Amino acid sequence: MSSDLILSLDFAKTIAMMSKSKKGKDVRLYFITLEKAYKRVTTSKIPQNFSQALLLASKQAEEIEKLEEMRAINAPLVEFAKTVQSVENEITVEEFAKIIFPKLGL
């Protein structure tokens, strides 16, 4: 006679981590790696006190300012790219050169 057992996720993890097999070692390494990644993300992003929050806000403001400067610098290029993209009557670079060079006297 067989019976089904229901294990909680935590208990299943415990059993897998206690196993002395290769799979058990893989499970332990997986959870260790996962925990390190979780700690790195949570501790580096969430300020623990007011001064850390101010420092983080200041760094983010600097990053936003740099991005805004880059956006302003690249605005003409973006506009040009949008214009080129929307052109319906396309010509090749060779055709363009034939048109432009006589006008430049070259």
Image: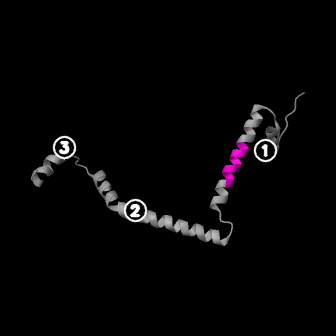
**Residue at left offset 81%, top offset 35%:** 19
- Which residue bears the numbered disc 1? 9
Q: Is residue 56 above or below residue 31?
A: below
* Amino acid type of the residue that numbered disc 2 sits on in the rendered structure: Arg
**Residue at left offset 85%, top offset 34%:** 4
Give me the C-alpha separation between circle 1 and circle 2.
48 Å
Q: Give residue 51's mark.
A: none
Which numbered disc, 1 or 2, marks the residue that appears first in the sequence?
1
- Which residue bears the numbered disc 2? 71
On whether residue 103 falls in the magenta region, the answer is no
Which numbered disc, 2 or 3, marks the residue that appears first in the sequence?
2
Q: Is residue 52 left or right of residue 86?
A: right
* Amino acid type of the residue that numbered disc 3 sits on in the rendered structure: Glu
Q: Which residues are magenta?
A: 30-39
Classed neighbour count for the residue bearing mark 2: other residues with Cα under 10 Å, few (<14), some (14–19), many (≥20): few
- Which residue bears the numbered disc 3? 94
Which numbered disc, 3 or 1, marks the residue that appears first in the sequence?
1
Q: Is residue 84 above or below residue 48?
A: above
Q: What's the image's color scheme? A: one colour
**Residue at left offset 68%, top offset 52%:** 38
